[in-house]
Amino acid sequence: MLEQPSTFEHLLVLYGRRFPVRRGKLRIVDSLWRAAAGGRGSKRIASLRHGDFKMPCDLEEMLQRQFYFFGTYLLAEEVLRCWEEAATRAAVVFDVGANAGIFSLAALAAQPTATVHAFEPTPEIAAELRETAALNRLCQLHVHQMAIHRADGHAALRRFRGEAGTNEGMNFVTMDLGDSNAEIVPTTSLDSFCAKSGIARIDLLKLDIQGNEHMALAGASRLLGAGRIGTIFVELNWAKPGAGVCPATESIRMLDTAGYQFSKPCVPLQWQRSGEWMRTTNDVVARQASHAPPADQR
């Protein structure tokens, strides 16, 4: 049974959501939440800024703590604002690397009639996202417990919580299945999934899969070649010099080849060609040049 928040906890939520100065807010909440929660456990229901959707949360987890105290993913606020703006024109949305589903929910808050497909390979996280969908009666949010890769098959799920061990959203898959203790999960490609599901076009796509973004794009060659993926939000995972294949470079190359232009996540989007400017960002938005607005309308 969920405990009622104390006055201190209620004030900390108000601070997180309403105090206008963003600087230092995350550090303050992270340092005070245990005292505010007291002995009332860590399970809560967050009320999100995005559509006022509800989300079960565990305050012990860094991302879920942000959802509860800030009503959003504070570290990705700018990207989420841009994503919501793009979602207002989307009928079919793919959230690849959905985790707790904040991008899926933000898309539905902006466009309630959209159909959202959320892909999350970690079993318990996918189950939690299904619980969130049921709690909000979102029959148009479809949760798929699988990884998006270059082909149908299987991959090994590698659990990773970041260098500090605090980020629950950094699990990833590899194709190395040799370890007898490996946790095996199904994979599919975007081309295959859409063909099997009768989906002709993806209007809005998010790729945040811890360095496998280029593999997902490789598995969408038919969709990209036919111009059937509209706007793409992709995380750029830059490899260190000499580290071999750079996922960010490969993602940009494939999108370049398919005729996409790029923008940093902002409102309004500022379209331009790929270039060295991209190395200063970890997230980029891509759209085929033929669909980007003329320069005088940007």
Image: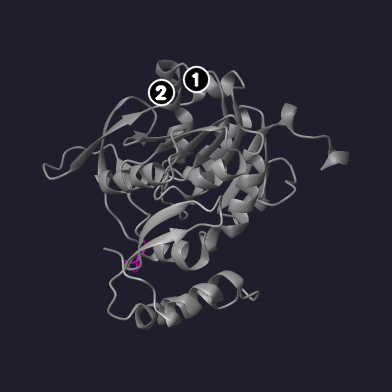
Residue 267 lies, in percent from the top left, at 72, 50
Picture quadrant where residue 17 is located: bottom right
- Dominant secondary structure (helix, strand or loop) of the stretch shown in magenta: loop
- The one nearer the camera, 221 or 266, is 266
Q: Residue at x 56, y 52 (%)?
A: 50
Amino acid type, label 2: Phe
Residue assigned mark 2 = 193
The C terminus, quarter of image: top right
Amino acid type, label 1: Ile
Is residue 83 covered in magenta? no
**Residue interval drawn in magenta:** 163-167
Which numbered disc flags the more N-terminal residue, 1 or 2?
A: 2
- Mark 2, other Cα within 10 Å: few <14 / some 14–19 / many ≥20: some
Residue 236, above or below 26: above
Picture quadrant where residue 143 is located: top left
Q: Residue at x 57, y 50 (%)?
A: 283
Q: Residue furthest left?
A: 180
Residue 27 in view, yes or no? no
